[in-house]
Amino acid sequence: MTFSIAFPNVDPVALEVGPVVIRWYALAYLVGLLLAWWYVRALAKRTSGAAALQDIDDFLVWATLGIILGGRLGYMLFYNFENSVQDPLTIFQIWRGGMSFHGGLIGVIVATVLFVRRRGIRLLPFADLIACAAPIGLFLGRIANFVNGELFGRASDVPWAVVFPHGGSEPRHPSQLYEASLEGLLLFVMLYLFWRTEGVRQRPGVLSGIFLVGYGVARNTVELFREPDAHIGFLLSGTTMGQWLSAPMILLGLYLIIRGSRRSAAPERKAPAGRSA
């Protein structure tokens, strides 16, 4: 006998006031960005020389644009390339759904590089702060995926399997919750504990590397339980698109960790007094 858990039929619309409709997915983005902004400010106050608080406030807009534009472009290029070629205007139809984490990551990286050059900020110490906060958005985003009943797992007979409304009659792995736990909660705790270690904090790039490796390993693991996109399916030797896109993250992360670990720790510098209020 196969046991399964009934899907909690939560309305995907979180709030509706007249013509204004706010869905849980959009709310996850909004709350995730605000919590990440608050958290980065809190870390910056205790990490001398990384960034001024005014810079962090201003970067919120840059990060938002990087996530939305990069996430949408990444989805169309990585997961829906044929349609984007046939009808390029679909790239701008964000309301139709379709966002890619890997595309959003590239968007944030580009936004970060442009921002620090414009402000004269050191790249890696600033990127380390952003990396520490990234799991907050990942956690909320995966919870929103579960509420929407999307990106579900493969058919399974585990006791906690869920019958998703769009996944047929078979119970499936709640892979969204696996990702929320690994990419979100666990990675957040790991980065915080490493950040508390002064030797790590004084080696720029190591925290960013830990994030990249941590996410890449977590995503590759969960992909073993997650149902591949129907229009893509399995790739070479049963791998998935998510695993192929995560592999470069792991390599880049390892490079940053090794590079940062080989550099001698330098004493933390204090930020200019006029820019940290």
Image (cartoon, helix red, strand yellow):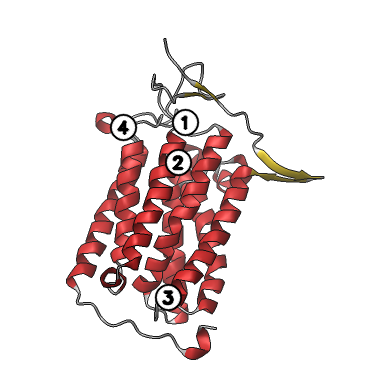
Q: Label 3 amino acid?
A: Arg
**Mark pair 4, 2: CA separation:** 16 Å
Which label was assigned to residue 235? 4
Q: In which quarter of the image is the C terminus?
A: bottom right
Circles 2 and 3 in contact, beta carbons < 8 Å? no
Residue type at mark 2 is: Phe
Query: 24 or 86, which lies in front?
Result: 24
The CA distance from mark 4 to mark 1 is 18 Å
Q: Which of marks 4 and 2 is in front?
A: 4
Closer to the N terminus: mark 2 or mark 1? 2
Relative horizontal placement of residue 212, taking residue 272 as reference (left or right): left
Q: Can residue 92 be seen in this view?
A: no
- Give the residue pinned by disc 3: 46
Name the amino acid, label 1: Phe
Q: Which residue is drawn at 48% across and 67% down?
A: 40
Q: What element carries label 1?
A: loop
Residue 12 place in picture, x, y as percent: 64, 37
Secondary structure of the residue carrying numbered label 2: helix
Front: mark 3 or 4: 3
Mark 4 or mark 1: name the one nearer the start of the chain: 1
| The label number, if any, that marks residue 152 in the structure image | 1
The amino acid pointed to by label 4 is: Leu
The residue labelled by disc 2 is 81
- The residue shown at (47%, 73%) is 115
